[in-house]
Amino acid sequence: MNNIKVHLDNLNIHFGKTHAVKDISMDFPENSVTAIIGPSGCGKSTMLRSLNRMHDLVPSARVSGKVLLDSDDVYGRGIDPVAIRRRVGMVFQKPNPFPAMSIYDNVVAGYKLNSRMVRSEADEIVESCLKRVALWDEVKDRLKANAMTLSGGQQQRLCIARTIAVKPEVILMDEPASALDPISTLKIEELIEELKERYTIIIVTHNMQQAARVSDYTAFLYMGDLIECGETKKIFTTPEQKQTEDYITGRFG
Amino acid sequence: MMKSVFLRNAKNYLMTGLMLTATLAVLIPLGLIFFHIMKMGMSSVNLDFFTQIPKPTGETGGGMANGMLGSLMMIAMASLIGLPVGIFGAIYLAEFGGSKVSTAIRFAADVLSGTPSIITGMVAYTLLVVPMKGFSALAGSVALAMIMIPIVLRTTEEQLKLVPGSLREASLALGVPMWRTTLKVTLRSALSGVMTGVLLAIARVAGETAPLLFTALGNQFWGKDLTQPMAALPLQIFSFAIAPYEDWHRLAWAGALVLVVVMFGLSLTARYFGRTRTGE
């Protein structure tokens, strides 16, 4: 097993009176893909979004327990959520490029919005990031076109390019392919495979075949509880828990 | 069977007729006002009207150039005061406010926008005219700004709320601080809608007379000093219309025509901005 990149210690998340994530402790190894699976409403996305403090925007959300990024406490005193989000990027379920920006500007949005852009570097960043998400050949002649002119699958790859442009250490993916057609999904999955060389990837997915295809480790959540986690091969062939087996064989969920 | 179909059709025609009548009841007065002002004002709108100040009593001719300049200056000043308050207030309400404070602010804004504008004028009179010991354009601008704030506040808030949360999240997830996200992503996306609200607020105060009566007071000459009384187009229309001179009545009609055309133009521009937004 690789080094531990992200470590959860008794993580609990409440929304008002709802206890969405219950006492979860687990590790996410570096340079690998960890899939989080489970039926709708089981707390997958909630857990994922706690890793880069996206819940800070929701007034009713309360996070307790520890989230460690390397050895830094993500929810520690004096920790700036902005600094955490620069290290932990996120790709959302629905492609969400900035509609008022060109393809080019979307890739360097993290720099532009923060006004720390050096013009000469920008071209280089755009080209290398678009190449890494295999979008360069499709858009190199229309970089100034509006990002919304791209297809859904292209938009999602653009969003991934935008995320890796700011050089995060961890990439969170919240069902990144669920709004896409099978060909686009395949491309995203191939991309995930390549990205893990450089990043630690945590992906939430509804699609168990996808989890089996792309991930090294899998965690199964049910009703806010972590039922089982371990190597993907083992989870999908010889799960220890009856509930896990029932879920992956499609008996419920 | 036949009878019920007949009854249903009859009801349908009756209701359609009633709605048509209601529509006409709204449109006819509007058309009458517009055509009457056109008829009465058209003959007096000439170059002099836009370049000259009113002639002394007894002389014919002259124009309302000072009133138009005064209106322009006071609206600009009112926008300078009112727009930042309205827009930043809306950002607070839509993006940062806790529920209790926000509800209180929204309620206050609704009450303020329902306040008769003459009351707003009295407030500006008490706050500025009395301590400064004199009528001034500044007091007039403050009164107008107080009318603009609730309009801009509520329309901007509505527009900001329409911006999908996924855009804010996209920006935040890139490590962009909340305040930059708000300015460069959220406000930027809502910009055309915000412009619509701003233009509507300007159109609204451009025609206000009551709050200027005892703040800016009016001026027969080129008053360009913000601490002195200043002419304004609606004020001039008011005082010229009630004066006993035929020539002044003509000027008042011309002023009314110019004012109506300006407001019409502002509303159309606001609609244009509104449309480009939904077209996206």
Image (cartoon, coloured by chain):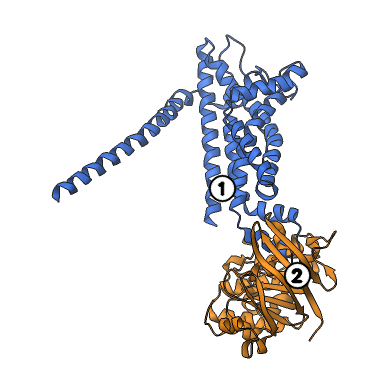
Chain colours: A orange, B blue
Q: How many marks?
A: 2
Frontmost residue, B152 versus A71:
A71
User: Extreme left residue here?
Assistant: B2
Above or below B153: residue A44: below
Question: What residue is disc 2 on?
Answer: A10
**A245 to the left or right of B101:** left
Task: State which quadrant residue B59 falls in.
Answer: top right
The residue depicted at 52 percent of the width and 41 percent of the height is B268
Frontmost residue, A211 versus A234:
A234
Q: Chain of mark 2?
A: A
**B210 to the left or right of A80:** left
Q: Can residue A186 be seen at all in this image of the molecule?
A: no
Frontmost residue, A115 versus A35:
A35
Residues at circles 2 and 1 in contact by the CB criterion of under 8 Å: no
The residue depicted at 59 percent of the width and 19 percent of the height is B62
Question: What residue is disc 1 on?
Answer: B273
Q: CA distance from mark 2 to mark 1?
A: 51 Å
The residue depicted at 59 percent of the width and 81 percent of the height is A243
Which quadrant would the C terminus of chain B be assigned to in this image?
A: bottom right
Above or below B90: residue A45: below
- Three-letter amino acid code at the position of disc 1: Phe
Frontmost residue, B144 versus B271:
B144
User: Extreme front residue here?
Assistant: A242
Within 10 Å of disc 1 (Cα), the crowding (few <14, some 14-19, many 20+) is many
> Residue A78, position in %: x, y?
85, 59
> Residue A240, position in %: x, y?
65, 86
**B218 to the left or right of B251:** right
Q: Secondary structure at mark 2?
A: strand
> Residue A93, position in %: x, y?
61, 70
